[in-house]
Image (spheres, rainbow, N blue to C red):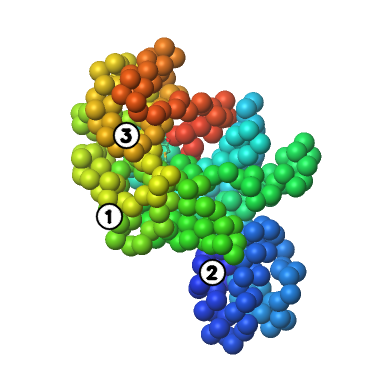
Amino acid sequence: MQKPHFYDLTYNHLVTLLESKELNPTGASKLFRWHYKFKKTEKCELELSKATQEFIYETFNFQLPEIVTAVESDDQTVKLLLKLSDGETVETVIIPFQNKYSICLSSQVGCAMKCSFCYTGTQGLKRHLNSHEIVSQIIVAWNWLLIHRSSSEGSSAIGQKTIKSIVFMGQGEPLHNFDQVKKSIEILLDQHGFSFGKERITISTAGYLPGLKRWLADDMPNVNIALSLHSPMAEKRNKLIPLNLRYPLEEVLEIIEQIPMQKKQFITFEYLLIDEFNDSSDDAHATAQLVKDKKTLMNLIPFNPIPGLTFKRSRDENVQNFKNILESYKIPSMIRTTKGDDILAACGQLKSKNLNA
Ligand code: SAH
């Protein structure tokens, strides 16, 4: 039988477990510090009793996904193809931002949402990731950075501060895998370990209403939320995100607006700009009308071409026109510069393989 994964344990769970074995519960903070704060993959060298050492390393599996390939793009974006223990693969993308990094995590192998513009969606859902498979993407990415990016910046540069943000914008619909995503977030936030700030983690959703309802009902830590909007018009949004037929935008927004937000937080709307489909002045005005009274940031994403699709990226002047119209309503927006599209690592270009198949 497979051992349970250490990276599936929340801090409180680990404390309770040590107590139940009559071991000193302070071992939990040392283990979290060692494996998450220091991101060490070998056995803990902080003072742990021999009994705790033995219990932990005999009971738990510390295996991390294996890096199959690491493809670096001209702009320094890195796409890691990771092999999971059952041979499935997912991708984690490391996106440079000045001298810091954003890590784009996958939450599922494949995706069930079938958005018409998204490469991951073409493969359907294979399975959900477990929380250990989500958390370990960061440890693997971190260690990759430590090996490959230390020399130019000095090894101390890969410290706690160099991963600026975590975004759940890789493969999968995070709210369709609510429990495991929530647990992974609890581990990422824990002050004994990674200690990420809530404002540095963003979950992006296509508008999966059952997951949004659970966010409200089930004590989800208030990390940032991003909604893939792509069109305020039902007819167009249905074509892009079939989920909109089942869970219409109005219902989705009604729930999102009830999610508690701290002062510095806002709802991010992602808007994919597709040439002659949703990038006209009319589209921009309708979008502005929808979001103008909300505390929001619009993230404009020029469509990244994917194999086999006829959709085209908006022309630069149309992207700028869209932004200008939003600005005329005083709606803050940014154009997401396409990172890594030369290596198919940009949004919506991720796809899995099963290496055992
Ligand atoms: N399922 C979630 C998170 C994964 S997709 C969601 O839908 O939000 C992350 C972001 O990438 C979404 O905004 C998605 O719409 C965008 N995306 C998907 N395919 C894309 C493509 N081909 N070009 C640009 N962005 C894309």
Q: Residue furthest front?
A: 263
In the displayed structure, would residue 292 be above or below residue 8?
above
Q: Is mark 1 on a helix, strand or loop?
A: helix
Q: In the figure, is residue 10 to the left or right of 157?
A: left
1 and 2 marks in contact (CB < 8 Å): no
Q: Is mark 2 on a helix, strand or loop?
A: helix
Q: Which of the 4 image quarters holds residue 273?
A: top left
What is the number of the mark on residue 21? Answer: none
In the displayed structure, would residue 189 be above or below residue 70?
below
Q: In the figure, is residue 303 to the left or right of 152?
A: left
Asked if the residue at label 3 sits under 8 Å from ligand 1, the reply is no
Read off the residue under disc 2.
11
Nearer to me, 353 or 294:
294
> For the residue marked with disc 2, what is the amino acid?
Tyr
Residue at point 51%, 32% (across, down): 346
> For the residue marked with disc 3, what is the amino acid?
Leu
Q: How many labels does the image show?
A: 3
Residue at point 31%, 51% (across, down): 259
Q: In the figure, is residue 49 to the left or right of 170?
A: right
**Could you tell me how far apart the alpha carbons at marks 2 and 3 are, in whole angstroms?**
35 Å
Read off the residue under disc 1.
213
Sooner in the amino-acid sequence: mark 1 or mark 2:
2
In the displayed structure, would residue 310 be above or below residue 203?
above
Sooner in the amino-acid sequence: mark 1 or mark 3:
1
Quadrant hosting ligand 1: top left
Asked if the residue at label 1 sits under 8 Å from ligand 1, the reply is no
What percent of the width, then of the height, locates residue 217? 29, 61
Q: Which of the 4 image quarters holds residue 151?
A: top right
Read off the residue under disc 3.
229
2 and 3 marks in contact (CB < 8 Å): no
What percent of the width, then of the height, locates residue 153? 75, 38
- Could you tell me if residue 84 is visible in this image? no
